[in-house]
């Protein structure tokens, strides 16, 4: 039957026969039934309302037979009068003798129908039939499977089935039916749960409206490594500025110590509530404190005094711990000193003033309004007007200098930024201490100036986060100081602003405006309603074992990481071959190191009954889940497949599932929560060339159905092609390969889908997930999006009614601050494909302009899709006409860049190419170096599988050229990533030279932009634009990005880019497409690369002076300090990422390198 349905309202207009006729009850009187019957094709169907009173004989006389009946309709099929020669083949024999029998029948033209029959529940006939039906002659096939223990198949039933001539006939529970795919219908409420165990997180960084309660993992106190661990019920949680910075996207999660262990949630640092014994406590956590329950180290908590409420107590931990740590531990405050405390009405500011007065210090502070000034004077009667300055400008500098007679202050506790920070630094007296608790200038890497240290001053970065592990001596001292402060009255509760648990977004927005005094609190626990409404999320028990067959495969490793991130700590990966690659070892080492996961590799064969039982029965911990991923492919047209090829494919899937089912029933029936097998869309919908694979998957699905029937957990997932990793990528090529009408589903989507399936309240044993190759075009805008943009922005601005905003008003006029700018920037980029360069452009947006973006009518440059690859549009240093693009397909792996041999220290310098694949841009540098320089280039023979493999390949050529060390290795940009890996594999390297790059330089870049895109088409467009802009000057960025993003497939985007580039330099579209794919692949390889150990040799990074915005995310040394045994040297070179290799800048670079090699 055709997939399209054409609606025909007037029967008289029908001139051809149709496949399906639907008869509506209300219109029966208008129909000519004879005409209607004749309109239906032979073997076509007639769907009729059950209320229509038409005699059965009338249908039968017109050669129709009823094939289905339900309460509201009847389905009739028009029979063929043709006598068909048919035969029956039984597929119940496991020795597969029927394979050759079916082959013979398919070539026999005298056989019109072949009935495939199975009387076994766990037979794979359905998947086999679906696949074979798509091959030549497959339309002659019919399928019958008896899934009941009762064998009802007799001559009379067979005769009826032959008359109806339906393709699939399944007998189960006393009725005949078939399998169909239906959309999984779930109500919105099914995604939520009322629970007393949840935490708050932001689903989309930068979008405060996505702040949501999420179901939390089960918290347990059983931790042998930390006997101090206790579970507490949270009554109040406090917000801190770190939470706001993280949620709005202004602070990267990577900046938080130990962020990898936080399972994606970093919000919440402090709370007050009850411990496991019912005692009132307040405490600190490294993250996930904005929750109903927390697991806390008792050394980071205090008992709440009887005269305090829990609300009051929740205002204490962070502010007083920070203030004591800064002033006493790091600042070494002394009695009678002069102290400047910025933002005095903030939590830390207020706490610091109280502590400073306890040391009889002279206190200066700053505030932003008269209201805050009066608040402080009331709170601290010793504080007079002349000691309270303005925090909105730098006038406090002169005011304090006047009062101190030019001497300045001994201590500055600073949270201000930029010019106000510099003014504060200038106020330091001799031997002064500057205590920086702000994050902005740190993250921006703003310069400080060295002259201040001529006064014998010290500068301290105050990061309370760094004290959150292992209870260091500094922390124990801070804990003691807070405790004594409570006793002597120095530590006092702060003013608070309280929001309820269902007002999370409002609380964050209120605090982000910076107008509050004291602390912003969330009241978590409400005795009248102790549960919160949270988004369901799958978590796994840390006290159970999870078994993954095929766990070392591509999908298996990703699933393993997902399980660990969701709480699992004991896993067994079944693999008869064991660990074979460095990537496998690296991934498992990472999980064991960062998550303390106990992961073991089992070589027991689950297809062997005895070995499978040994695997299940001998686990010390109860088994919580089975994930059966193992599979073997032996694809080929059915006519070419042998019984051995069937047995090899079926053995791992059918026998593996059968024995895992048998022995989990026997040994783990009470503890098992999940029994999941990975099936295939090839089984569910059929795919030519995979009859054995379809058969094998179908057997697993039948076992899962039986398990659910028996009340046991089971789920079979029919996957389409899997992207990024696994068999499709390894065997068929790329994420654009079409398999069985589907495109590869990306790994992040697969894991989200698993989570979704596991959360379904309806127990469906077989589900499916795939991406159709025919993607639907998306409209540029919708009424929903249009109606919501202004309302969303009004919400960010704190305006209750969006209609009150004047069309000519800019967002700056409406009070937009820097944090709100970040959130709106994220909103426009992610949901409206609008890119704006900076906060100034955002603040100048008018309400009228926003309405234009809403309606999708904008044609100005700012409305095009996506962003540049580099946050600022880089102009190519050379035009396409002046560069030979054939360099991008180099023929020579190693080329000589100069002919100088003056260096006595090293024989040669080997430079690794950037992402372009060639080293022509390094020639000028090489000519200025007194050493023979060779360049390594990316030829067609170079591996494309991993950075490790590329490095190993280059090492062979290096040793061939220079048999013995010491070696001098350098890499530019992407090449620095390869150079780092070469340094790890080649132990005789004396010095590593990295030209504006590192192991994580490219990865940080790509991950930042990948996070911005909800749709892969925008990410792919950005990558291709980055490729094009290197060689075509003056590209219309917005136009190109918009047009690329709106093409329907990656292949179309490649064709567009190739056509554009070929207009300038004629080297052929196929070559350009190859070059673009190589460019994209190198980005992906660099993104995945993680060094397996530390670099032992000397390392020097030559970092550019301008355009180096990555340093704020990965540090001034581009993250090298984390992978180098010794501290890397960082030298600043004038110019940007390209121009530092040109003109006068390259001579500066050459001079610096010469000091190393001479």
Image (cartoon, rainbow, N blue to C red):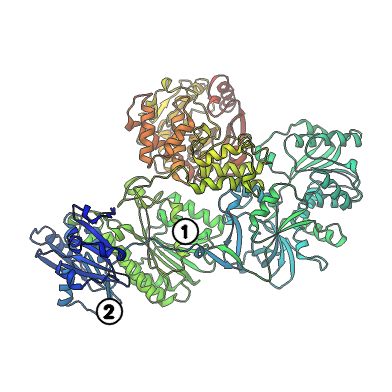
> Residue 155 location, x and y as percent?
14, 76
Residue 48 placement: quadrant: bottom left
- Asked if one can make out residue 251 in the rendered structure from this viewpoint, the answer is no
Tell me if 961 is positioned left or right of 204 in this view: left
Q: Nearer the viewer, mark 2 or mark 1?
A: 2
**Which residue is nearer to you in this view: 113 or 166?**
166
Furthest toward the bottom, the residue is 150
Instruction: Residue 560: give its label.
Output: 1
Above or below for 765 versus 827: below
Q: Secondary structure at mark 2?
A: loop
Identify the residue shown where x is 73% and y is 34%: 448
Tell me if 571 is positioned left or right of 165 in this view: right
Identify the residue shown where x is 43% and y is 52%: 747
Q: CA distance from mark 2 to mark 1?
A: 38 Å
Residue 1136 placement: quadrant: top right
Q: Earlier in the sequence, mark 2 or mark 1?
A: 2
| Disc 2 packing (10 Å; few <14; some 14–19; many ≥20) | few
Tell me if 368 is positioned left or right of 978 in this view: right
Are the residues tagged 2 and 1 within 8 Å (C-beta)? no
Furthest toward the left, the residue is 110
Above or below for 14 versus 951: below
Instruction: Residue 362: give its label.
Output: none
Q: Which residue is the site of mark 2?
A: 149
């Amino acid at each position: 039957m055709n997939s399209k349905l054409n609606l025909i309202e007037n029967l008289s207009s029908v001139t051809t026969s149709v496949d399906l006729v639907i008869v509506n009850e209300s219109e029966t009187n208008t129909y000519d039934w004879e005409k209607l019957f004749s309109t239906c094709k032979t073997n076509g169907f007639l769907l009729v309302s059950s209320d229509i009173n038409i005699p059965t004989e009338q249908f039968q006389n017109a050669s129709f037979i009823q094939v289905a009946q339900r309460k509201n309709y009847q389905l009739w099929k028009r029979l063929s009068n043709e006598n068909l020669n048919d035969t029956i083949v039984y597929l119940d024999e496991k020795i597969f003798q029927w394979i050759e029998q079916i082959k013979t029948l398919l070539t026999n033209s005298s056989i019109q129908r072949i009935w495939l029959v199975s009387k076994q529940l766990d037979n794979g006939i359905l998947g086999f039939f679906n696949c074979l039906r798509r091959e030549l002659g497959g339309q002659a096939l019919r399928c019958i499977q008896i899934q009941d223990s009762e064998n009802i198949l007799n001559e009379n039933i067979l005769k009826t089935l032959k008359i109806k001539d339906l393709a699939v006939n399944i007998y189960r529970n006393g009725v005949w039916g078939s399998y169909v795919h239906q959309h999984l219908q779930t109500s919105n409420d099914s995604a939520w749960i009322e629970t007393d165990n949840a935490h708050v997180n932001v689903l989309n960084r930068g979008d405060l409206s996505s702040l949501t309660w999420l179901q939390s993992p089960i918290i347990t106190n059983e931790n042998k490594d930390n006997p101090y661990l206790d579970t507490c019920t949270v009554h109040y949680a406090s917000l801190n500025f770190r939470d706001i910075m993280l949620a709005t996207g202004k602070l990267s999660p990577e900046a938080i110590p130990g962020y990898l262990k936080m399972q994606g949630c970093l919000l919440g640092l402090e709370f007050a509530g009850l411990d496991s014994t019912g005692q009132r406590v307040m405490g600190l956590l490294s993250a996930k404190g904005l929750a109903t329950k927390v697991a806390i180290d008792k050394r980071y908590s205090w008992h709440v005094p009887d005269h305090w409420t829990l609300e009051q107590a929740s205002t204490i931990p962070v502010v007083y711990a920070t203030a004591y740590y800064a002033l006493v531990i790091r600042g070494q405050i002394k009695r009678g000193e002069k102290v400047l405390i910025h933002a005095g009405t903030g939590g830390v500011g207020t706490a610091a003033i109280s502590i400073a007065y306890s040391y009889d210090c002279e206190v200066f502070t700053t505030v932003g309004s008269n209201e805050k000034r009066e608040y402080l004077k009331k709170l601290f009667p010793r504080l007079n007007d002349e000691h309270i300055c303005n925090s909105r400008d730098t006038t406090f500098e002169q005011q304090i200098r006047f009062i101190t007679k030019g001497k300045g202050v001994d201590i500055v506790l600073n949270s201000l930024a930029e010019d106000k920070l510099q003014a504060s630094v200038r106020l330091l007296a001799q031997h002064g201490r500057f205590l920086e608790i702000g994050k902005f200038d740190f993250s921006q890497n703003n310069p400080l100036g060295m002259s201040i240290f001529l006064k014998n001053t010290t500068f301290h970065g105050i990061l309370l986060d760094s004290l959150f592990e292992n209870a260091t001596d500094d922390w124990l001292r801070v804990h003691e100081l807070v405790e004594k402060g409570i006793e002597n009255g120095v530590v006092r509760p702060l003013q608070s602003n309280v929001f309820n648990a269902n007002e999370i977004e409002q609380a964050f927005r209120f605090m982000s405006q910076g107008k509050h005094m004291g602390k912003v609190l969330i009241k978590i626990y409400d005795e009248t309603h102790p549960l919160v409404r949270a988004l369901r999320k799958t978590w796994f028990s840390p006290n159970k074992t999870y078994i993954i067959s095929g766990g070392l495969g591509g999908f298996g490793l990703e699933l393993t990481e997902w399980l660990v991130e969701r709480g699992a700590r004991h896993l067994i990966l079944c693999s008869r071959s064991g660990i074979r690659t460095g990537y496998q070892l690296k991934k498992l080492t990472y999980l064991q190191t960062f998550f303390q996961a106990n992961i073991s590799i089992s070589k027991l064969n689950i297809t062997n009954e005895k070995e499978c039982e040994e695997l299940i029965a001998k686990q010390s911990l109860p088994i919580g889940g089975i994930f059966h991923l193992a599979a073997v492919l032996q694809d080929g047209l059915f006519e070419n497949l042998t019984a051995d090829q069937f047995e090899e494919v079926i053995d791992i899937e059918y026998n593996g599932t059968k024995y895992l089912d048998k022995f989990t029933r026997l040994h783990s029936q009470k503890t098992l929560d999940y029994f999941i097998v990975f099936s295939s869309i090839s089984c569910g919908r059929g795919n030519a060339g995979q009859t054995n694979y379809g058969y094998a998957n179908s057997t697993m699905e039948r076992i899962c159905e039986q398990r659910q029937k028996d009340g046991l957990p089971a789920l079979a997932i029919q996957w389409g092609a899997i992207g990024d990793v696994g068999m499709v990528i390894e065997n068929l090529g790329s994420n654009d390969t079409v398999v069985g009408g589907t495109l590869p589903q990306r790994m992040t989507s697969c894991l989200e889908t698993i989570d979704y399936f596991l959360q379904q309240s309806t127990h469906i044993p077989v589900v499916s997930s795939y991406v159709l190759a025919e993607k639907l075009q998306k409209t540029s805008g919708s009424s929903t999006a249009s109606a919501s943009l202004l309302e969303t922005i009004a919400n960010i601005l704190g305006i209750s009614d969006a209609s009150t905003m004047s069309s000519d008003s800019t967002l700056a006029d409406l009070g937009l601050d820097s944090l709100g700018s970040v959130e709106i920037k994220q909103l426009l980029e992610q949901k409206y494909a609008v890119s704006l360069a900076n906060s100034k452009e955002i603040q100048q947006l008018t309400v009228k302009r926003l309405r234009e973006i809403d309606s999708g009518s904008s044609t100005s440059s700012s409305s095009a899709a996506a962003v540049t690859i580099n946050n600022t549009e880089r102009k190519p240093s050379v035009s396409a006409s002046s560069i030979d693009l054939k360099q991008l397909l180099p023929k020579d792996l190693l080329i000589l860049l100069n002919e100088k041999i003056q260096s006595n220290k090293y024989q040669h310098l080997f430079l690794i190419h950037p992402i372009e694949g060639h080293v022509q841009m390094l020639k000028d540098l090489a000519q200025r170096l007194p050493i023979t320089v060779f360049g390594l280039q990316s030829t067609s023979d170079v591996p494309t599988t991993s950075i490790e493999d590329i490095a190993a390949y280059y090492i062979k050529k290096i040793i061939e050229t220079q048999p013995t060390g010491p070696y001098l290795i350098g890499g530019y940009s992407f090449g620095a990533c390869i150079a780092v890996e070469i340094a790890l594999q080649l132990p005789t390297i004396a010095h590593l030279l990295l030209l504006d790059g590192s192991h994580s330089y490219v990865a940080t870049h790509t991950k930042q932009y990948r996070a911005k895109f909800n749709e892969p088409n925008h990410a792919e467009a950005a990558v291709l634009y980055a490729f094009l802009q290197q060689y075509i000057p003056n590209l219309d960025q917005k136009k190109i990005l918009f047009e690329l993003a709106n093409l329907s497939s990656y292949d179309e985007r490649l064709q567009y880019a190739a056509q554009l580039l070929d207009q300038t330099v004629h080297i052929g579209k196929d070559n350009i497409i190859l070059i673009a794919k190589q460019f994209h692949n190198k980005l992906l390889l660099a993104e995945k690369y993680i060094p397996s150990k530390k670099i032992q040799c000397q390392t020097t990074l030559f970092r550019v002076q301008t355009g180096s915005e990555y340093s704020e995310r990965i540090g001034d040394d581009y993250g090298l300090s984390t992978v180098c045994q010794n501290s890397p040297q960082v030298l600043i070179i004038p110019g940007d990422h390209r121009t530092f290799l040109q003109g006068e800048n390259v001579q500066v670079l050459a001079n610096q390198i010469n000091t190393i090699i001479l």
